[in-house]
Structure formats: structure tokens, C-alpha cells
Image (tube, helix red, strand yellow):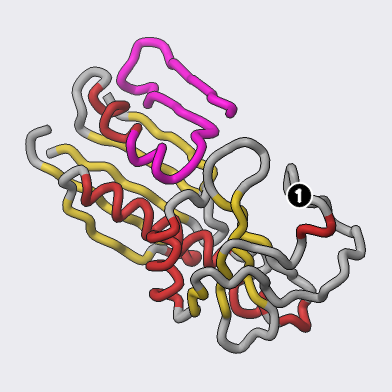
Amino acid sequence: MKTITIEIDAEGNVKVEAHGYKGIGCKDATKALEKALGAVTEDKDKPELYQSESVITVKR
Amino acid sequence: MSHVARVAVEVRDLEALKAACKQLGLEWREGQTKYAWYGVSVGDYPLPVGFAKEDLGHCEHAIHVPGAEYEVGVCRRRDGKPGFELLWDFYSPGGLTAQLGTNGQKLVQGYAIAVATKAAKAQGYTVKQEAGTDGKVRLVLSKWGG
């Protein structure tokens, strides 16, 4: 099953995490949620699923 | 693939903000164009982009906080981006820091919960809300297929 967890700490910081998606599906799945919440400040693919880590930081 | 994104919350959905107010026991005042504050900017903190000193105290809507003398102003952003700024005076005798936290984080957190839940449900997710440690709130979204 596919799940997404959204963690909002007491300071109002938000972390969105996607699990169980294949390929780039997880980015599509979380994109609308991230957009509804605000501006993405950091976007990381989980390194264990890749041979090399890919990190994208988006500043808007 | 899995991934993690961090998001800086921006207030764009007034319905979600109203829902957060209700949840937190705050009073939404639709169309109230002034919010209570100290009344004079002493210039000790920078203003949001596009706002002048004279703009303080004016808003599109206001939020009345029971137990506090001062109020929160909901003001359209003036930096060219969509959405709203929450303006409020955190001078402590005004009472807002005691009710909302030093940075108004209770309101920001409440808004984030409301807007994320709404967006998730709109996409067909089942949403479960869990209370975490240190005041954290976790929303667990699940969906079969998709």
C-alpha cells in the first residue's frame, strides 16, 4: 500500500514523506499536497533506493 | 521510490484557515479591516515585503483570540505572490504570544493540518491524525492503487 506521512511540528515546520511508490510516482503523489501547503524548501530522494544519492533543493 | 520534502507553510486557503480557527477556539471575523495591536510601530522588527508602517493595523479579515487583547490581521500578500500574511503584534501584554506561541506557531500548525487534510481528502486519501511527541502532529495518508 502507498502511504504518505505529513509531519507538522510545534513550530509549524512541515515534512512530507512518501513510501511505497514506484518510479517517479511518489513525486506526482506529493506534489499537489506540497503545493497546497506552501513552498518546497528541500526535496530529497531516499538514498537507499539509488546507487547514488540524488538531492534536489528548490528555493522559490 | 520514496522521498522526503520540506515545505515552508504559506497561507493561501482561507477556508482552511477558518477551519483551523474553529479547531483552536479562535474567532474568525470576516471582513473586519482592522486588527487590535499596540498601534505604533517602534521599528524594532522588519516588516513583510511590500508593507509600510502605515499598513499595520489594516487587514482583509481578522482573527479574535479569546483571552488576548490584540488580534491577528489576515492581509493579502504584497510581494507579488498569492496568499496572505498573518500580521500580529507579539508585544506580550497584548496576550497573543501566550495564546498562540512566540511565533504564532499554534495557528500556523493548525492551518497546515487543515490545508493538508483537505488536499489529501480531495485526492482520495484516507487521513489519520496522530499526536506525536514535542507537540508534533502527524497525518498518515493512505490509498489503495493509484
- Residue extent of the magenta highlight: A32-60
The amino acid at mark 1 is Phe
Q: Which of B53/B65 is in front?
A: B53
Residue A40 position, x and y percent, is: 49, 34
Label 1 environment density (alpha carbons within 10 Å; few <14, some 14–19, many ≥20) = some
Please report the residue visible at 52 percent of the width from the left and 48 percent of the height from the top: B9
**Above or below, comparing residue B133 to residue A2 in the picture:** below
Direction left: furthest residue: B145
* Residue A11 located left or right of residue B87: left
Picture layout, residue A51 above or below residue B76: above
Placement of the N terminus of chain B among the 4 image quadrants:
top left
Q: Residue at x 74, y 43 (%)?
A: B49
* Chain containing the residue with disc 1: B
Q: Nearer the viewer, residue B134 or B76?
A: B76
The secondary element bearing badge 1 is classed as loop
Residue occupied by mark 1: B51
Q: Residue A33: percent from the left, percent from the top? A: 34, 41
Q: Is residue B28 left or right of residue B90?
A: left
* A4 and A37: which is toward the camera: A37
Query: Where, by quadrant of the figure, is residue B95 drawn?
Result: bottom right
Q: Is residue B140 magenta?
A: no
